[in-house]
Amino acid sequence: MKKPKWAIEKERARRAAASETVWLFGLHAVRDALTNPAREKLRLMVTRNAADKLREAIDASGMEPEIVDPRKFAPPIDPQSVHQGAVLEVRALEWGSLPERCAGGDAPGAARVVLLDRVSDPHNVGAILRSAEVFGARAVIAPRHHSAPETGALAKTASGALERQPYLRVRNLSSAMEELRAMGYILLGLDGEAKREISQAVAEFGARPVALVLGAEGPGLRAKTRETCDELVRIGAVGGFGSLNVSNAAAVALYAARGV
Protein backbone atom coordinates (compact mmCIF):
# COMPACT_ATOMS: atom_id res chain seq x y z
CA MET A 1 0.00 0.00 0.00
CA LYS A 2 1.35 3.38 -1.03
CA LYS A 3 2.03 5.78 1.84
CA PRO A 4 0.10 9.05 1.82
CA LYS A 5 2.04 12.18 0.88
CA TRP A 6 1.87 13.64 4.39
CA ALA A 7 3.44 10.47 5.87
CA ILE A 8 6.27 10.53 3.33
CA GLU A 9 6.96 14.22 4.03
CA LYS A 10 6.95 13.60 7.78
CA GLU A 11 9.49 10.77 7.46
CA ARG A 12 11.65 12.91 5.18
CA ALA A 13 11.60 15.77 7.69
CA ARG A 14 12.50 13.39 10.52
CA ARG A 15 15.48 12.02 8.57
CA ALA A 16 16.63 15.51 7.67
CA ALA A 17 16.44 16.64 11.29
CA ALA A 18 18.39 13.57 12.42
CA SER A 19 21.19 14.33 9.95
CA GLU A 20 21.53 18.02 10.89
CA THR A 21 24.33 19.07 13.18
CA VAL A 22 25.13 22.25 15.08
CA TRP A 23 28.53 23.82 15.67
CA LEU A 24 28.82 25.25 19.17
CA PHE A 25 31.62 27.69 19.91
CA GLY A 26 33.11 29.56 22.84
CA LEU A 27 34.55 28.13 26.06
CA HIS A 28 31.34 28.30 28.12
CA ALA A 29 29.07 26.77 25.49
CA VAL A 30 31.55 24.03 24.59
CA ARG A 31 32.33 23.18 28.22
CA ASP A 32 28.67 22.80 29.16
CA ALA A 33 27.92 20.70 26.09
CA LEU A 34 30.89 18.43 26.77
CA THR A 35 29.65 17.72 30.28
CA ASN A 36 26.02 17.19 29.23
CA PRO A 37 25.40 13.42 28.96
CA ALA A 38 22.23 14.06 26.94
CA ARG A 39 24.14 15.86 24.19
CA GLU A 40 25.36 13.77 21.24
CA LYS A 41 28.86 15.06 20.54
CA LEU A 42 30.56 14.43 17.20
CA ARG A 43 33.71 16.48 16.68
CA LEU A 44 35.81 18.74 18.91
CA MET A 45 38.34 21.23 17.50
CA VAL A 46 40.44 23.23 19.97
CA THR A 47 43.66 25.17 20.19
CA ARG A 48 46.19 23.95 22.75
CA ASN A 49 45.35 26.88 25.03
CA ALA A 50 41.60 26.15 24.85
CA ALA A 51 42.24 22.42 25.42
CA ASP A 52 44.10 23.25 28.64
CA LYS A 53 41.18 25.37 29.85
CA LEU A 54 38.68 22.64 28.95
CA ARG A 55 40.76 19.70 30.18
CA GLU A 56 38.34 18.48 32.86
CA ALA A 57 35.32 18.74 30.54
CA ILE A 58 37.17 16.99 27.70
CA ASP A 59 38.24 14.17 29.99
CA ALA A 60 34.69 13.80 31.30
CA SER A 61 33.29 13.63 27.77
CA GLY A 62 35.65 10.88 26.65
CA MET A 63 36.22 12.71 23.35
CA GLU A 64 39.53 12.86 21.52
CA PRO A 65 39.99 16.52 20.57
CA GLU A 66 41.59 17.75 17.37
CA ILE A 67 44.37 20.13 18.45
CA VAL A 68 44.67 22.91 15.85
CA ASP A 69 47.31 25.57 15.38
CA PRO A 70 45.69 28.96 16.20
CA ARG A 71 47.04 30.37 12.93
CA LYS A 72 45.27 27.63 10.97
CA PHE A 73 42.11 27.47 13.06
CA ALA A 74 39.29 27.70 10.50
CA PRO A 75 36.21 25.86 11.83
CA PRO A 76 33.02 25.76 9.70
CA ILE A 77 31.38 28.70 11.49
CA ASP A 78 30.91 32.39 10.76
CA PRO A 79 34.42 33.93 10.65
CA GLN A 80 33.16 36.77 12.87
CA SER A 81 32.18 34.37 15.66
CA VAL A 82 34.18 34.73 18.88
CA HIS A 83 35.07 31.05 19.29
CA GLN A 84 37.92 31.43 21.83
CA GLY A 85 39.70 28.54 20.18
CA ALA A 86 37.01 25.94 20.84
CA VAL A 87 34.27 24.54 18.60
CA LEU A 88 32.17 21.42 19.03
CA GLU A 89 29.94 19.70 16.47
CA VAL A 90 26.81 18.24 18.06
CA ARG A 91 23.31 17.11 17.27
CA ALA A 92 20.37 19.16 18.53
CA LEU A 93 19.02 18.19 21.93
CA GLU A 94 15.83 16.17 22.19
CA TRP A 95 13.74 17.49 25.08
CA GLY A 96 10.69 15.29 24.64
CA SER A 97 7.08 16.35 24.30
CA LEU A 98 5.31 19.38 25.71
CA PRO A 99 3.29 17.33 28.25
CA GLU A 100 6.46 15.57 29.44
CA ARG A 101 8.08 18.91 30.23
CA CYS A 102 5.16 21.06 31.31
CA ALA A 103 2.50 18.88 32.95
CA GLY A 104 2.48 18.08 36.67
CA GLY A 105 5.83 16.96 37.99
CA ASP A 106 7.59 17.44 41.29
CA ALA A 107 9.03 20.92 40.66
CA PRO A 108 8.40 23.23 43.64
CA GLY A 109 6.08 26.23 43.35
CA ALA A 110 3.64 27.08 40.60
CA ALA A 111 4.76 26.01 37.11
CA ARG A 112 5.91 28.69 34.67
CA VAL A 113 6.63 28.40 30.96
CA VAL A 114 7.56 30.95 28.30
CA LEU A 115 6.13 30.97 24.78
CA LEU A 116 7.80 32.99 22.03
CA ASP A 117 5.75 34.16 19.06
CA ARG A 118 8.18 34.42 16.14
CA VAL A 119 11.17 35.66 18.14
CA SER A 120 13.87 34.96 15.56
CA ASP A 121 16.98 36.67 16.94
CA PRO A 122 19.22 33.94 18.43
CA HIS A 123 20.78 36.42 20.86
CA ASN A 124 17.36 37.28 22.29
CA VAL A 125 16.36 33.62 22.57
CA GLY A 126 19.68 32.74 24.18
CA ALA A 127 19.21 35.46 26.78
CA ILE A 128 15.62 34.30 27.41
CA LEU A 129 16.85 30.75 28.01
CA ARG A 130 19.25 32.10 30.65
CA SER A 131 16.43 33.97 32.41
CA ALA A 132 14.11 30.96 32.16
CA GLU A 133 16.74 28.79 33.84
CA VAL A 134 17.35 31.35 36.60
CA PHE A 135 13.64 31.65 37.42
CA GLY A 136 12.88 27.94 37.12
CA ALA A 137 10.66 27.89 34.03
CA ARG A 138 9.61 24.42 32.90
CA ALA A 139 10.34 25.22 29.26
CA VAL A 140 10.75 27.87 26.59
CA ILE A 141 8.44 27.07 23.66
CA ALA A 142 8.62 28.44 20.11
CA PRO A 143 7.26 27.50 16.68
CA ARG A 144 9.53 25.45 14.43
CA HIS A 145 9.28 28.05 11.69
CA HIS A 146 9.97 31.79 12.05
CA SER A 147 11.85 31.38 15.33
CA ALA A 148 15.50 31.04 16.30
CA PRO A 149 16.77 27.46 15.83
CA GLU A 150 19.47 25.90 17.99
CA THR A 151 22.69 27.49 16.74
CA GLY A 152 26.15 28.32 17.99
CA ALA A 153 25.23 31.99 18.38
CA LEU A 154 22.19 31.09 20.48
CA ALA A 155 24.22 28.68 22.62
CA LYS A 156 26.97 31.24 23.24
CA THR A 157 24.45 33.89 24.34
CA ALA A 158 22.69 31.33 26.54
CA SER A 159 26.07 30.72 28.25
CA GLY A 160 25.33 27.09 29.07
CA ALA A 161 21.58 27.41 29.65
CA LEU A 162 20.87 25.70 26.33
CA GLU A 163 22.18 22.46 27.84
CA ARG A 164 19.87 22.66 30.87
CA GLN A 165 16.79 24.72 29.95
CA PRO A 166 14.26 22.86 27.77
CA TYR A 167 13.77 24.64 24.42
CA LEU A 168 10.79 23.06 22.68
CA ARG A 169 10.06 23.74 19.00
CA VAL A 170 6.41 23.04 18.18
CA ARG A 171 4.53 22.80 14.92
CA ASN A 172 1.84 25.33 15.86
CA LEU A 173 2.09 27.83 18.71
CA SER A 174 -1.68 28.30 19.15
CA SER A 175 -2.16 24.54 19.41
CA ALA A 176 0.58 24.38 22.03
CA MET A 177 -1.18 27.14 23.96
CA GLU A 178 -4.44 25.21 23.87
CA GLU A 179 -2.59 22.12 25.06
CA LEU A 180 -1.17 24.08 28.00
CA ARG A 181 -4.64 25.44 28.81
CA ALA A 182 -5.92 21.87 28.97
CA MET A 183 -3.18 21.19 31.54
CA GLY A 184 -4.51 24.03 33.69
CA TYR A 185 -2.21 26.84 32.59
CA ILE A 186 -3.34 30.47 32.50
CA LEU A 187 -2.10 32.07 29.27
CA LEU A 188 -0.88 35.64 29.81
CA GLY A 189 0.20 37.60 26.74
CA LEU A 190 2.48 40.58 27.21
CA ASP A 191 1.17 43.80 25.69
CA GLY A 192 2.33 47.29 26.61
CA GLU A 193 -1.22 48.64 26.20
CA ALA A 194 -2.90 46.09 28.48
CA LYS A 195 -4.93 47.31 31.44
CA ARG A 196 -3.53 45.10 34.19
CA GLU A 197 0.04 44.56 35.28
CA ILE A 198 1.36 41.02 35.20
CA SER A 199 1.87 40.85 38.97
CA GLN A 200 -1.79 41.71 39.58
CA ALA A 201 -3.00 38.97 37.25
CA VAL A 202 -0.66 36.36 38.75
CA ALA A 203 -1.79 37.28 42.28
CA GLU A 204 -5.40 36.63 41.28
CA PHE A 205 -4.67 33.20 39.82
CA GLY A 206 -2.74 32.11 42.91
CA ALA A 207 -0.92 28.79 42.58
CA ARG A 208 -2.18 27.95 39.07
CA PRO A 209 0.51 27.37 36.45
CA VAL A 210 1.18 30.35 34.18
CA ALA A 211 2.36 30.55 30.58
CA LEU A 212 3.92 33.87 29.58
CA VAL A 213 3.52 34.67 25.89
CA LEU A 214 5.87 37.18 24.27
CA GLY A 215 5.93 38.46 20.71
CA ALA A 216 8.76 39.61 18.51
CA GLU A 217 10.00 43.15 18.83
CA GLY A 218 8.09 45.46 16.53
CA PRO A 219 5.11 43.34 15.46
CA GLY A 220 4.47 41.92 18.95
CA LEU A 221 1.93 39.14 19.32
CA ARG A 222 0.12 37.98 16.20
CA ALA A 223 -3.67 38.28 16.11
CA LYS A 224 -4.25 34.53 16.51
CA THR A 225 -1.83 34.38 19.45
CA ARG A 226 -3.53 37.33 21.15
CA GLU A 227 -6.93 35.72 20.72
CA THR A 228 -5.70 32.46 22.25
CA CYS A 229 -4.40 34.17 25.41
CA ASP A 230 -6.65 34.24 28.48
CA GLU A 231 -5.59 37.80 29.23
CA LEU A 232 -3.20 40.46 28.00
CA VAL A 233 -1.02 42.00 30.70
CA ARG A 234 1.74 44.59 30.85
CA ILE A 235 4.94 45.16 32.73
CA GLY A 236 4.58 48.09 35.07
CA ALA A 237 6.75 51.03 33.99
CA VAL A 238 7.57 54.44 35.39
CA GLY A 239 7.41 57.33 32.94
CA GLY A 240 6.29 57.54 29.35
CA PHE A 241 8.88 55.20 27.85
CA GLY A 242 7.76 51.69 28.75
CA SER A 243 9.27 49.51 26.01
CA LEU A 244 11.79 46.75 26.73
CA ASN A 245 13.86 44.47 24.54
CA VAL A 246 12.04 41.10 24.37
CA SER A 247 14.75 39.29 26.32
CA ASN A 248 14.65 41.93 29.06
CA ALA A 249 10.85 41.79 29.06
CA ALA A 250 10.99 38.01 29.51
CA ALA A 251 13.32 38.35 32.51
CA VAL A 252 11.13 40.98 34.19
CA ALA A 253 7.95 39.02 33.45
CA LEU A 254 9.40 35.81 34.87
CA TYR A 255 10.43 37.66 38.01
CA ALA A 256 6.98 39.25 38.36
CA ALA A 257 5.31 35.87 37.79
CA ARG A 258 7.62 33.82 39.99
CA GLY A 259 5.87 31.10 41.97
CA VAL A 260 5.10 31.37 45.65
Image (cartoon, helix red, strand yellow):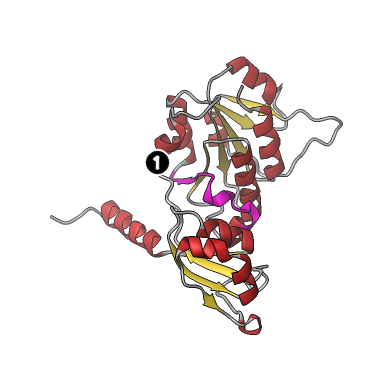
Residue found at the far left of this picture: 1
Q: Quadrant of the N terminus?
A: bottom left
Q: Residue at x 53, y 67 (%)?
A: 88
Tell me the quadrant of the picture where the C terminus can be found.
Answer: top right
Residue 243 locus on image (x, y percent):
77, 39
Left or right position of 101 against 128: left
Which class describes the residues within 10 Å of circle 1: few (<14), some (14-19), or many (20+)?
few
State whether residue 121 appears in this view: no
The answer to whether residue 187 is above or below residue 54 is above
The residue shown at (43%, 60%) is: 40
Q: Is residue 192 magenta?
A: no
Q: Is residue 187 left or right of residue 79?
A: left
- Secondary structure of the residue carrying tag 1 is loop
Considering every residue shown, the one lying at the far right of the view is 239
Pinpoint residue 92: horizontal percent, then vertical percent.
46, 57
**Residue 162 part of the magenta-drawn span:** yes
Quarter occupied by residue 67: bottom right
Of residues 122 and 161, the one drawn nearer to the viewer in this rendering = 161
Residue 240 in view of the camera: yes
Residue at the image position 27 percent from the left and 57 percent from the top: 8
Residue that mark 1 sits on: 97
Tell me where residue 103 appears, x and y as whole percent: 43, 30
At label 1, the amino acid type is Ser
Taking depth in this image into account, of 78 and 175 the one nearest to the observer is 78
Q: Which residues are magenta?
A: 156-171
In this rendered view, identify the residue nearer to me: 159 or 53: 53
Q: Where 91 falls versus 142 (above or below)?
A: below
Residue 100 is situated, as x and y percent measured from the top left of the image, at 40, 36
Q: Which quadrant of the figure has residue 122?
A: bottom right
Q: Is residue 2 left or right of residue 151?
A: left
